[in-house]
Amino acid sequence: MEETSTDIQNKVVLITGGTSGVGKAIALGLAKLGAKIVIISRSHERGQKALHDIAEATGNEKGEFMVADLSLQSSIRKVSEEFKRKYERLDVLANVGGAVYFEKQLTSEGIERTFALNYLSHFLLTNELLDTLKESRPSRVITVSGAPRFLKKANFNIEDVQSINHFSGLGATTQALFARVIFTYELARRLEGTGVRAFTFHPGLVQSNLTRNAPWYIKVYGKLANRRAKEDCEIGVYLAAAKEVENVNGVFFDDKKQLMTLPILQDEEIGRRLWSISEELAGISKM
Ligand SMILES: NC(=O)c1ccc[n+]([C@@H]2O[C@H](COP(=O)([O-])OP(=O)(O)OC[C@H]3O[C@@H](n4cnc5c(N)ncnc54)[C@H](OP(=O)(O)O)[C@@H]3O)[C@@H](O)[C@H]2O)c1
């Protein structure tokens, strides 16, 4: 971040997944720059621990956390209302929380869990907070995705977005990575001229607890990967804070800050269809 200029000091940044992995790395980086970090976690204990770690590492004690289960729309709506009551502005929304599940399971609201958490939560939380983001313009929505080598060859299944018919844990996770990118491009098209920007990015290999639900052999792989992984997520911090990107919108960056095109995922018709399916699944009225 040395050569990057920012004015993130005291800006309000809401981060899902801020207790671990990519989200925590971004929270740390932004706290170091003086931002006010608000973290969403399912647990008081993990939220408190993350804030403690961040304050200890950065000296920034402005952080707060809110509790929600982002796989449930009722919980997303509740935490969004709570956020709007508590904070007057939202400068950056970072959609980073996620998990890998190896078995198909519907949430109590009837949505496939991987899709509900890894994609639909980003769609709904963003929509619930859109007015606040617009009022706080210029503001940003940044959404994590995956490695460009997968995204470039994306085979997104728009006919079965939740991977209900052919479920595999990794397949459903990849489908959600594609959906996050399609969502970002469509969001940017819809927000043109509002002062709210939308970016998506590959975080690189960041230390993570993603294999916590995995069979033992994948857990072993996760442990080995963590040895090679980095603790920070420079690209996430850059996209949340850097002035250099204040005039771009609807873009994907790899972990080396390279702006890349992903033609398959930029298709406008797919973007419109996914938006419309998401509105229906999330029970929100047409934007
Ligand atoms: N790590 C990498 O190298 C990497 C690379 C590419 C893409 N990604 C993507 O980045 C995302 C995050 O990965 P990670 O490595 O940061 O994983 P992680 O270390 O396992 O952290 C996951 C975070 O998501 C939160 N979370 C999980 N389920 C939740 C729920 N139901 N409600 C609310 N929050 C929930 C967790 O919070 P609580 O447990 O506190 O609730 C935690 O903070 C994933 O979607 C992954 O695909 C990661």
Image (spheres, rainbow, N blue to C red):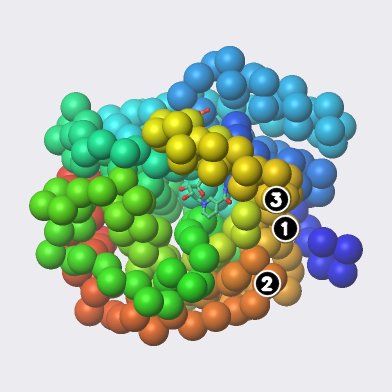
SS type, badge 2: loop
Q: Could you say which disc has been placed on residue 171 in the image? A: none
Q: Amino acid at mark 1?
A: Glu
Residue sitting at 36 percent across and 64 percent down?
Answer: 178
Q: Please tell me which residue lies in front, 281 or 146.
A: 146
Q: CA distance from mark 1 to mark 3?
A: 16 Å
Residue 55, horizontal then vertical, whole percent: 79, 29
The residue singled out by tag 1 in the image is 234
Along the horizontal axis of the image, is 53 left or right of 124? right
Which quadrant, please, contains the C terminus?
bottom left
Name, please, the residue furthest toward the front.
Answer: 217
Q: Is mark 3 within 8 Å of ligand 1?
A: no
Q: Amino acid at mark 3?
A: Arg
Residue 212, horizontal then vertical, whole percent: 48, 31
Q: Amino acid at mark 2?
A: Lys
Q: Please tell me which residue lies in front, 188 or 201.
A: 201
Give the quadrant of residue 71. Answer: top left
Q: Given contact means CB atoms under 8 Å apart, are the residues at marks 2 and 1 in contact? A: yes
Q: Is mark 2 within 8 Å of ligand 1?
A: no
Q: CA distance from mark 2 to mark 3?
A: 20 Å
The residue singled out by tag 2 in the image is 257
Q: Is mark 1 within 8 Å of ligand 1?
A: no
Along the horizontal axis of the image, is 128 left or right of 60? left
